Amino acid sequence: MSERLYALLRSDWAPGFLLRGGPRGVSGTSSPAVVRILGSRSIDEDGEEVAKSFDDLTPEESKERLGKIVDKIDADQDGFVTETELKEWIKKAQKKYIYDNVDRQWKDFDMNNDGKISWDEYKNVTYGTYLDDPEPDDGYNYKQMMARDERRFKMADRNGDSIADKEEFTAFLHPEEYEHMKEIVVLETMEDIDKNGDGFIDLEEYIGDMYNHEDEMDEPEWVATEREQFSEFRDKNKDGKMDKEETMDWILPADYDHAEAEAKHLVYESDSNKDGKLTKEEIVNKYDLFVGSQATDFGRPLEDIWWSCPDEIRRSVLAVHILKIDPTNVTRSSQVGVT
């Protein structure tokens, strides 16, 4: 595992790094909720997580539990689920995932239980013995990683006291969720991909981040498509490279709402009578679609599963799911490497 992947994995918004069509962030995935299609943690009628995931249920049990969730999604209790209600429910799920994740990690880092996490606490828990030997023989440059963490911590620390409260620590773990943290998301992305250190991402660096041509004689078709995407859409000023602003538009586009896209997809696929809204019966009839959706998934940690997959597989999963959400959005799909 490379230093970059290790750092991203620990940051808890790693999968979003692959999702160039939306916010960089589970960890990843906002932590892009689209990443969470790879797993499912169900909720009960009060919106709380339950012990058994949908993966562990029979089809009939899944339908029964999904029916209970539908009652909660239907905010006005009129017997129909609209696209707007689905979008709001999905956003609620995204927020719950983020705050639950922060709560889990909070216990590990707040060593003195004072309700705050200092930079020293985070540093000691994360790096421990590596502080004495920041450049061991295992291939990781912990000194460099720690410097990156400290830079991000300082940006999240709005009052500059080197101590993070819950909101500041959330910004540290999920920078893509905060406007004042977007600069660090872009900066870290560019540092990861900019191999020649000139402060830009050129075409070969862009392709090299997605594809290792050493293992194949001929480039896959999707790589050629990516080259076209770079020239036609990424490199807006046509100077052969992406600057900071162009990279921002690539990884944190302002015009793409994942919750809205997923809601549209669910309605489109499930609305059998095409009246623009869903009955409980229509939703339950498509239970296999919904139990793999953000609407029923609060995003359990998937790092072990996600990062055990090769880069190409991860990108394929994300690209295919983007096309499922919006079949017309070939551009967004190709942003993660597959059309």
Image (cartoon, rainbow, N blue to C red):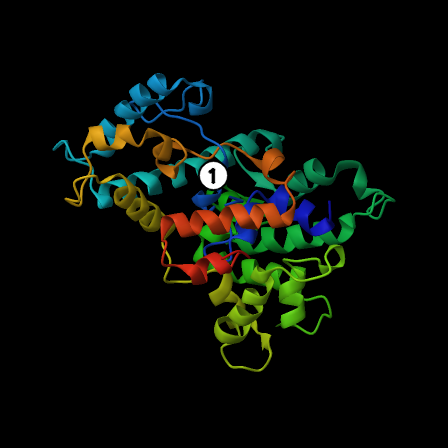
Residue ranking furthest to the right: 137
Q: Which of 25 and 38 is in front in this view?
A: 38
Q: Which of 23 and 112 is in front in this view?
A: 23
- On screen, residue 53 above or below 249: above
Crowding near the residue tagged with mark 1, few <14, some 14–19, many ≥20 C-alpha atoms within 10 Å: many
Residue ranking furthest to the front: 218
Residue 300, position in %: x, y? 49, 32
Residue 17, position in %: x, y? 56, 52
Residue ranking furthest to the left: 78
Residue 110, position in %: x, y? 59, 33
Q: Quarter of the image for the N terminus: give it.
A: top right
Residue 224 figure quarter: bottom right
Q: Nearer the viewer, residue 192 or 318?
A: 318
269 relative position to 110: left or right? left
Residue at image mark 1: 36
Question: Is any atom of residue 252 visible in this view?
Answer: yes
Question: Is any atom of residue 191 visible in this view?
Answer: no
- On screen, residue 101 above or below 153: above
- On screen, residue 205 above or below 117: below
227 relative position to 31: left or right? right
Q: Which residue is drawn at 58% across and 61% down?
A: 221
Number of residue marks: 1
Q: Residue at x 69, y 62 (%)?
A: 218
Residue 328, position in %: x, y? 36, 58
Residue 119 figure quarter: top right
Q: Is mark 1 on a helix, strand or loop?
A: helix
| Residue type beneath disc 1 | Arg
